Amino acid sequence: MNPPMLKIELPVELLFGERVQYLERTAEEVRRQLESFTGGPVAYDSTALQALDEWIERRTRRGPLSPGERVQIIAFVGQMFLKRHGGFWAVREERGRRSLGVVCPLVGSSRHLQFIDLTGQVHRRLKEGITASLTFFYLTTSVDLQGQTVSE
């Protein structure tokens, strides 16, 4: 008998091994940088995202973020989702663009996963400013993941 197939919103490539370890290390570096920025302990929670939003606001006043800084932000936000909701790092290609994100399970389903496009959201955050807050994005997406019911 074959195990049930996972159903993911769109075709994605799941990441494993060294690529995941790199993202985990990068997220931890960001967490430590946020501790230095705030002067206190920082956990993987919405308070940390508030600090990250503030750091982004201050940093972008000096000029655009480097690609490396963008990856750092994506890694930290991704770890937030994975620590709270479980799931996997993934890459999705759509219309010739690759987006790094996570796939997280929908509450009430052991097989249905939703891709969360972190590359796109960080791009929106940098383009639109605080009105595209990562804190707000994380909280509303978390509610969506917990509030959807899927029949198996």
Image (cartoon, rainbow, N blue to C red):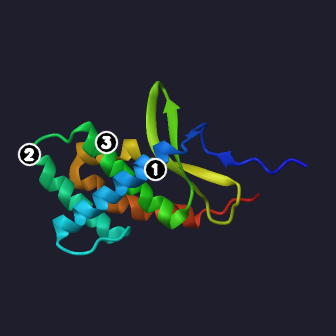
Mark 2 Cα-neighbour bin, 10 Å: few <14, some 14–19, many ≥20: few
Residue 21's disc is 1
Element marked by disc 2: loop
Counting labels gives 3
Element marked by disc 3: helix
Which of the two discs, 3 and 2, labels the residue nearer the N terminus? 2
The residue pinned by badge 3 equals: 123
Amino acid on which disc 3 is placed:
His
Residue 62's disc is 2
Question: Residue 139 location, x and y as percent?
Answer: 41, 65
Amino acid on which disc 1 is placed:
Gln
What is the C-alpha distance between the residues marked 3 and 2?
Answer: 17 Å
Is residue 19 among what the camera can see?
yes
124 or 119, nearer to the observer: 119
Mark 1 Cα-neighbour bin, 10 Å: few <14, some 14–19, many ≥20: few
What is the C-alpha distance between the residues marked 1 and 2?
Answer: 30 Å
Question: Residue 128 location, x and y as percent?
Answer: 24, 46
What is the C-alpha distance between the residues marked 3 and 1?
Answer: 23 Å
Q: Residue at horizontal 68%, vertical 66%?
A: 108
> Seen in the image, is 103 located left or right of residue 78?
right
Tell which tag, 1 or 2, sits nearer the viewer: 1
Say which quadrant the C terminus sits in: bottom right
Amino acid on which disc 2 is placed:
Arg
Q: Residue at horizontal 52%, vertical 43%?
A: 90
Which of the two discs, 3 and 1, labels the residue nearer the N terminus? 1
> Seen in the image, is 103 located left or right of residue 61?
right
Tell which tag, 3 or 1, sits nearer the viewer: 1
Query: Farthest residue in the right direction?
Result: 1
